[in-house]
Amino acid sequence: MSGFDVLTRGEVLDTALKARDYLITCGVPAALAAKDPRLWGRRAVDHSRLGWLDLPESSQALLAQLDDLVAEVRYSGLDHLVLVGLGAEGLAAQAIIDAGGGADPRGDVTVLDGADTAALDTVLKRLDRTLVILSSKAGVSIEGDAYRRVLVQAFRDHGLSEQEIAGRFVVITDHGSPLSEFAGQCGYRVGLTDPYLPGHFGALSAYGLVPAILAGTDVAPLLDQAAAASSSLAREDDNPGLLLGAVLGGCAQPPPGGVVRDKMVLREPGGGSALTGWISQLLATGTGKRGRGILPLDPAGLPGTDTCPDLHGIAVNPQSPAATDADTSLWAPLGAQFLLWEYATAVAGWLMGVNPFESAHDVIQETEDDAATILQNAGHGPLPTGQPSFVDGGIEVYTEPSGFDSYSLAGGVEALLRRVPATGYLSILTYLSGDFSGRYLAPSLARRIRRPVAYGSGPGYLHGTGSFHKDGPRNGAFLVVTGADLADHAVPGRPYTLGKLQLARALADVRALRRRGIPVLRLHLRDPIEGAGRLIDIARDAR
């Protein structure tokens, strides 16, 4: 696919055309093309925050700079890439690798983001072939530090010298970041990026491209695709990014006597992918603030289109308009997808009156610092989980201090469902190793409450979308599922394991949500396999 186009219809078309005309009247396309930060107020946005518009050209320099490193990696037989990091940047890299494939057919990629501690076992079996990439704009996360410690010790046990271990790590971070200084002290290779570039707008920067290049993906066509789309973004007519932004931002505005369509369903042939995951995090971070925001959803969490007038659907590269019931369809190759969605998010943010380039650093750091404090205070002892409100069949049920007025698991879930606002949503957040996820519960619960259900794995889900859930409309309710870790690993130099760290993260996220008045029910599965089966049965039986 070489071209790009946006097609919309029905009520969404009318809304989008009015929003696009308003954008043109206000001179937004020309101002964005000129990278004029005054669009968001004289002091709200610095000119350098718009540098993502130049990445299709400026990132070309990366290709030649990495030639020697790529050759060394290939010569050393390091065809297993381990990507350690949370957030949209890692999802962008995954999307590029998935779409482009690797130069070496034996090569593969493992992502360590704290969501599934069992994934580490895969890495430990391939140490002789493994190259590790630590990716973070500021400092390495608490999960990143834990994984780095585990991998360094594993390399030592494998017989590698300290110099050889340093050669197995590549760090991507900002100029002047704490991680940059630390990596230099360790002797790791360091790739530095622009500290002013918003992380969620960095798909075409080193954060997205370097892991893909090291995995053997040819990213030159990707940048060419983005450059081809870039030439259309200065126009008022035939500007797909402007129309997509008008769809997003226009639907999120309260119409006279109508319903705000601030929940967007992303559809992609074959189901969700790293691309739609990246889009979700970009939009949630870019628009979720000041009591506003756009909530991206997976089709599996829908109750039926006739019951949720606040939904609108966007199909990504459908086979044809007739092949989908989405309101809007976007066709574009991957490089153009990145740039068009970034542009559309900027436009939607302007329409919604929010600064789309604000990072979610404070939201992220709040829970990370809280989790670190929980672990420090616990030392080698157990975490302060508190006493469960009750235990039902091996599942500990933790309600809010006021209680849910029920002493059965099914009753507790039902009580939470009743607290989903009429224009709100349910979110299922799982902190478990293995394959179980909220996807197994979402369809049944969505039909039960006739509201959409979002879901994801912690801590990455709230790391990437927490700006919406915590600083957006705050009209969600959360079902948080934790459990005993069946594939645990000690963290060298720390008094905790990966499983204990994962639970601390869950406790910190629950506390952050409750501080904001968001209803939360936490379930802890003493036996994750048996408990997951019970939850699926309860979701199916919900009435």
Image (tube, rainbow, N blue to C red):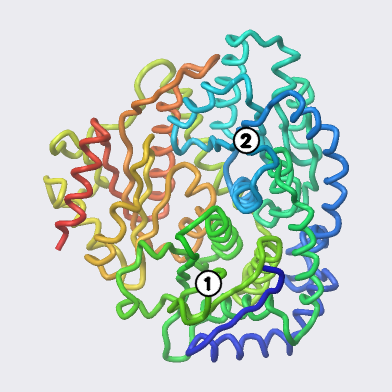
Q: Which residue is mark 1?
A: 318
CB contact under 8 Å: marks 2 and 1: no
Q: Amino acid at mark 1?
A: Pro
Residue 236 location in percent, x, y?
76, 85
Q: Which residue is painted at 66% across and 28% down in the image?
A: 131
Does residue 289 appear in the picture of this structure?
no
Mark 2 surroundings: few (<14), some (14-19) or many (≥20) residues within 10 A: some
Q: Which mark is residue 541?
A: none
Residue 539 location in percent, x, y?
21, 54
Horizontal side of 39 relative to 321 (left or right) equals right
Residue 278: quarter of image? bottom right
Horizontal side of 214 relative to 463 (left or right) equals right
Mark 1 surroundings: few (<14), some (14-19) or many (≥20) residues within 10 A: some
Please, what secondary structure does the residue beneath circle 1 have? loop
Horizontal side of 372 relative to 89 (left or right) equals left
Residue 25: quarter of image? bottom right
> In the image, is residue 240 above or below residue 93?
below
Taking depth in this image into account, of 541 and 514 the one nearest to the observer is 541
Quadrant the C terminus occupies:
bottom left
Q: Which mark is residue 107?
A: 2
Does residue 227 appear in the picture of this structure?
yes
